[in-house]
Amino acid sequence: MTSPQAAALAPSQPIVSLKDVTKRFPGIVANDSISIDFFPGEVHVLLGENGAGKSTLVSMLSGLQQPDDGDILIDGVRKAIQSPQHALSVGIGTVFQHSMLVPSLTLVDNVNLGGRWWRSPDRPAIAARMSETARSIGVEVTPMAVTNSLSLGEQQQAEIVRALMRGSRFLILDEATAMLTPKDAEKLGLLMRRLVSQGLAVIFITHKLNEAVAYGDRISVLRLGKKVGAIAPDALKSLGPEKVTQEIVRLMFGQSEDKTAQPQADTVSRAKPPLGEPVLEILALEVDDPSVPVSGVELKIRSGEIVGVAGIDGNGQKQLAEALAGQRPIRNGRIYLDGAPLEDLSVGDRRKRGLRYVTDDRLGEGTVGAFPVSINLLLKQIGEAPFWRSGLENPSEIAANARKQVVEFDIRTPSIETPAGKLSGGNIQKLLLARELTGSARAVIFAKPTYGLDLQNIAASRRRIRDAADTGKAVLVFSTELDELLELSDRIAVMSQGRVVGIVDNDASARQRIGEMMSGVAK
C-alpha cells in the first residue's frame, strides 16, 4: 500500500503520461485509446491477461515501437520516443523479465556497453560508481563478477543499478518477479519501495495479485487492448486487500462492460457432445525443467471432448505439451492413449499410435521454411509409403497428397512447390492443421492454436478444433486466451507454477473461477 514517503513526494504532475495512445498491428488493435498517468513516488501496477496490451505499452515507452495515434508526454511535454537510447535520454529505463545482460561479461562491462568505443573504459571508476549507486538504494553488487555466475535476483538488481546510473527517473519492471524465487521477489518488492521513496516512478507489471496489492500504490487494468479500470491510492487504502483483489479479478476476468470492445473472431459456443471413453490419460506426470518443473499433473480427455488448459504464460504449459508429444523426457508418471502406455515411445511412434501435436512455433519447429508446401505436409512421415519407396521419393503421391490437402484445408499458396516460409502465418497454421488432423488421429494437442492470427484465420482454426472433437477425437487445447477456451472447451484445467490447480466445467461461473485460480486467489 502507499507509503508515507511516496505520499509526501508525489506531486500533482506525472513524470510520464499516455494520452489516447493507440497501436495497431495487422488484424488487431493492441492498444486502443489508452490514457494513464504515472507519478513520481508511486509504484504503478499494470495488470491484465496475456494479450491485454501490456507488452505493447512497454515497447512504446521503451522506444521499441511508436504509437499510431495519441501522445506520450514527459514532464507534461509531448515526446516522440524514437529508440531505446532516446528513452534512456529522457529518463525511462526498462528491466525485462529475462535478463538483458551479456552472460559472459562482467557487470562493469555490461554497464559500459553502448559507451564510448574509441577509448578503453575506466573499469575501476565504473565499479566505484556502480557500488555507490547500489548502496544508495540499499543493495549490494559485485561489479567485477561475471554475470552468469550470479543468481537471477542479483542480475536483476544489477540491471536496476545500471538503469539508475544512466539517469532513469521512470523505471519499468516487466514481469520482474516471474523468474524469481519467493525470497528474491520479496527483496524486489522492498527495493521498489526504496526507489519510490527517493522520488522515482515505477511501473510494475505482474500477474500475481498478492504482489500487486502488497507493493502497488496505484493499479491500472488492461483488457483486450483497452484500459478497463483503475484503483487509486485512496481506494487501495480504504478497501483493504480482500476487496481490492475482488475488484481486480472482476476487472480482469469479468464480463466486459465496454460495448465497443473488439469483437471476438467466432462467438458461437460449442454444444456439449455425448462423451465416449477416455482416450488420452495423464497420471501423476512430472517433467524436469530449470525454470518451471511440471509436477503431479492428472488429466483425462474423452472421445469427443475438448479440454482446455488455461494459465498465465510460463507456468509449465509448454513443458507439459512437449512432454505429451514426446519432445521432452518425463521424470515420472504415465501417459496412456486408448489404454496403451506412450511414455517410452518416440515422437514418431506416438504419432503412429494416433497422438498428434500442433505446435505454436509454426516457423521454428512446425515447418522447414525452405522446403516446399508438399514436403512440409509430410514432414512427420518422411520415408514412409506410399510417399517414399525404398528410400526414394514418389513425386506423384507426394504431389497428389499436397493438392488434396491444399483444397480441403484452404491453404492459400501459389503452388504446392512454394517454400512454406513464404506463406502467411494463417496459411502456415492451415498447413499444420492439415498435417496433424488427417489420417488416424485419435488425440490432438493444440498449443496456442490461434496465436498471432487474424480474425478470419482464428475463426477457421477454432472450427477445425471443434470438427476434430465432433469426429470423436480427444482434444487438448493449451491457450493463454481465456475467451478462446471458454468458447471451445467442455472443461478447463488451470495451470500455475507447473501444477494443475483446478479443473472446472465450462458453465456460467467458469470465467470467474478460472480468473481466481489464474491469479492465485482461489484453488
Image: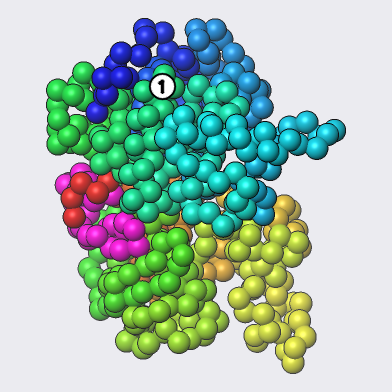
- Which x, y percent locates residue 181? 37, 54
Residue of label 1:
198
- Which x, y percent locates residue 284? 29, 76
Q: Which amino acid does label 1 sit on?
A: Gln
Task: Name which residue lies at 75% across and 58% down.
Answer: 418
Residue 336, magenta (yes or no)? no
Q: Residue 22: in sight, yes or no?
A: no
Give above or below for 341 relative to 399.
below
Which is more toward the observer, 209 or 306? 209
Give above or below for 461 relative to 403.
above
- Which x, y percent locates residue 215? 30, 33
Task: Name which residue lies at 61% across and 63% down.
Answer: 365
Residue 513, magenta (yes or no)? yes
Give above or below for 427 relative to 216.
below
Side (left or right) of 287 relative to 218: right
Which region is colored magenta? 492-518
